[in-house]
Amino acid sequence: MARLVESSRGDNADDEHDPEGQTIAFERSQLAAVTAETQERLAEVRAAVRRVVDGGYGTCEVCGRSIPDGRLEARPTATTCVEHAARR
């Protein structure tokens, strides 16, 4: 997706004079936002996998207690217990 956004960046540079320019700019912005969010989620998943490998998965990074299974099922990339997640 990032390549698609980048490759279309020069297209329709004069958006305000193109009848579809605003739509194209909006779609490009939407795609860029989705791409950034996807990259952020991927980074969270990779960090969770590292915690699995290192033995720290399921442990709150603030207090060191176990993160409840229900929280990990709902949010597998969680790094804090429910108590500390509520404080953020």
Image (cartoon, grey):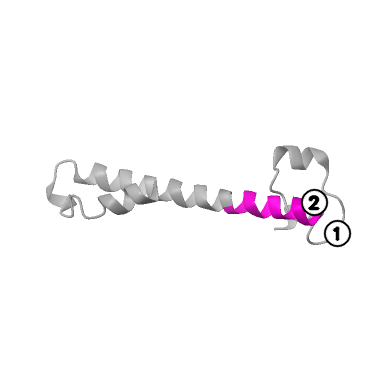
Q: Which residues are magenta?
A: 43-58
- Which secondary structure is most common in the magenta stretch? helix
Of residues 88 and 64, the one drawn nearer to the viewer in this rendering: 64
Q: Is residue 79 above or below residue 34?
A: below
Of residues 55 and 39, the one drawn nearer to the viewer in this rendering: 55
Circle nearer the viewer, 1 or 2: 1
Taking the spot 78% from the left edge, 49% from the top edge, the residue there is 82
Residue 9, position in %: x, y?
26, 54
Residue 64 shows which numbered tag?
1
Whether residue 30 is in magenta: the answer is no
Helix, strand or loop at label 2? It is loop
Q: In which quadrant of the rendered image does the C terminus lie?
A: bottom right
* Label 1 packing within 10 angstroms: few (<14), some (14-19), many (20+): few
- The residue that disc 2 covers is 81
Instruction: Report, in whole angstroms, how far the alpha carbon at label 1 lies from the one at label 2.
Output: 9 Å
* Label 2 packing within 10 angstroms: few (<14), some (14-19), many (20+): many
Q: Is residue 61 left or right of residue 40?
A: right
Q: Earlier in the sequence, mark 1 or mark 2?
A: 1
Helix, strand or loop at label 1? It is loop
In the image, what residue type sits under mark 2?
A: Cys
Residue 48 shows which numbered tag?
none
